Image (cartoon, grey):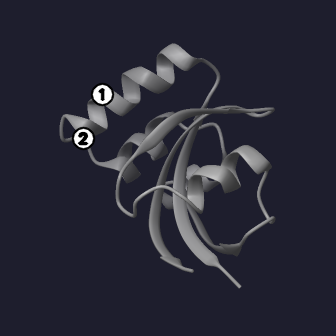
Amino acid sequence: MARASARHILVATEDKCNELKAAIEGGADFAQVAKDNSSCPSSRQGGDLGTFGRGQMVKEFDAVVFSAPVGVVQGPVKTQFGYHLLEVTSRQD
C-alpha cells in the first residue's frame, strides 16, 4: 500500500496561502512559516503530519500527496478546512 509523509500549512485565504508560498520559495523555512501562520494543530510540529496511507486524508490532499514530487511545495490546495500548502517529505509507492 502506498504511504507518504508530508507537512502542511493551513490558512483561511488563497491570498495568504500564495503569500506564504512565495516566502518559502524565497528561502523562508517551511517549519517556521507553519509555526507562525498555520491554523492546524500540526503547526506546533512545523506542519508535520507524519506518515499516512492513501484515503486517510481528504481527497484533495490525497490527490496532491500521492502524485506531487517529493520536496516541492504544492498549493494552494483548497479543502473544506481552508487553503493548504503541502510538501511531500517522503513516499513509498
Residue at the limit of the structure toward the left, as seen here: 27
Residue 4 x %, y %: 58, 73
Decide: few, some or many residues near mark 2? Use Cα within 10 Å; few <14, some 14-19, many ≥20: few
Residue 6 x %, y %: 53, 63
Amino acid identity at mark 2: Ala
The quarter of the rendered structure image containing the C terminus is bottom right
Q: Mark 2 against mark 1, which lies toward the viewer?
A: 1
Mark number, residue 44: none
Q: Is residue 25 above or below residue 2?
A: above
Q: Secondary structure at mark 1?
A: helix
Residue at the limit of the structure toward the top, as seen here: 15
Which residue does the image show at 69% across and 74% down from the upper left? 52
Q: Does residue 63 appear left or right of residue 69 in this picture?
A: right
Residue 85 x %, y %: 50, 40
Which residue does the image show at 49% across and 34% down from the upper left? 37
Q: Secondary structure at mark 2?
A: loop
Q: Is residue 13 above or below residue 33?
A: above
Which residue does the image show at 59% across and 63% down from the upper left? 66
Residue 90 x %, y %: 46, 74
Which residue does the image show at 47% across and 44% down from the upper left? 34
Q: Does residue 47 appear left or right of residue 51 in this picture?
A: left
Mark number, residue 22: 1
Work out how far the residue at label 2 is from the one at label 1, CA to CA, in angstroms.
Answer: 9 Å
User: Dots 2 and 1: beta carbons under 8 Å?
Assistant: no
The quarter of the rendered structure image containing the N terminus is bottom right
Instruction: Depth check: give the residue in front, 27 or 60.
Output: 60
Quadrant housing residue 87: bottom left
Q: Does residue 63 appear left or right of residue 86 in this picture?
A: right
Mark number, residue 28: 2
Instruction: Depth check: give the residue in front, 46 or 2.
Output: 2
